[in-house]
Image (cartoon, rainbow, N blue to C red):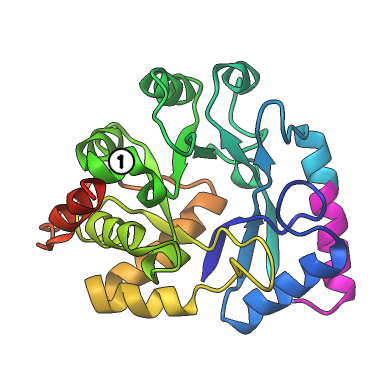
Amino acid sequence: MIDIHTHVLPGFDDGAPDLKTSVAMLQMAQEHQTTAVVVTPHVIEGKWFPSWQEIKSGYELLRQEALQSGVQIAIYPGAEVAMSLEILKLLSEPGPYCINCSRYLLVELPSQEIPFFADHFFFSLQLKGMVPILAHPERHPELAKYPEILRKWVEKGVITQMNGSSLLGRMGERVQATAELFLKQHLVHCIGSDAHGVNYRRPQLQEAAVKIIHWVGEKQAKLLLVENPKRIITDQSIDVSSTQEPILCRSLVQIRHWFQR
């Protein structure tokens, strides 16, 4: 399995605070059958705003430390970029802040709202040759309430990454129900751990893999956990269109009920 969303880079954000924790996270990921991880520190205007060069330097330091510690897992550079107009100005071409210097850029929405410029943000990235990957859409209350917004973005070429912990109910019932809905409606293209440490939000995808197999089958699980992530880190195209029929579920009714409580 390939984990394209981790906060394992030491001292960059609210993830691993030091190299010791970073290596422990990599060891844990390896023990749970993950073969490669992408380090995706937050890039948030006014909070955590590392340069691409700083991220690459931190990545190289971690890679060397992992090798010396006997960790065999492959590591790739990347970032989780917060959606903002100021950051958009810095993103001029594929490469900087993108996963493994590819065309794929991991993007995070504000936690409670969808910016009025969201469509413009995604389209601008695409005009510059980048492919936006929307991080954990199942956690966003507006997308949970109005999944047609996410479907519109996917139809326009936005890739989505779901958190494994969401599938397991660790982010709450509403998020889990939304995750099931998006998964069964074929609105998910890859799974990541969004790991932040070894004691909470861990770098483990095995349990999520079991849940995916139960809900949508082994073939789809392999696509989300292995094949599509591999295409991302090797800068190959991903087909966002689905020829499969959506799997019926009652999740949308449940989700809207939660918002009425």
Q: What residue is rendered at 51% in x and 39% in y? A: 108
Residue at mark 1: 143
Q: Which of 245 and 228 is in front in this view?
A: 245
Q: Is residue 244 magenta?
A: no
> Which of the 4 image quarters holds residue 201?
bottom right
x and y percentages locating residue 254 in the rendered image: 18, 58
Quick check: 48 above or below 245?
A: above
Q: Start and end of the magenta stretch?
A: 58-71
Q: In this view of the protein, which residue sits in the foreground, 143 or 65?
A: 143
Q: Residue visible at 59% across and 24% down?
A: 93
Q: Residue at x 64, y 47 (%)?
A: 100
* Viewer can see residue 226: no
Toward the viewer: 61 or 117?
A: 117
Question: Residue 125, percent across and down?
Answer: 48, 24
Q: Is residue 76 above or below residue 101?
A: below
Mark 1, secondary structure of its residue: helix
User: In this view of the protein, can residue 148 be seen by the observer?
Assistant: yes
Query: Where is residue 55, by image quadrant?
Result: top right
Q: In which quarter of the image is residue 46?
A: top right
Q: Is 46 on the left-hand or right-hand side of 156?
A: right
**Residue type at the position of mark 1:** Leu
Asked if residue 177 lies left or right of residue 1, the reply is: left
Residue 229 coordinates in the image, percent (x, y):
48, 58
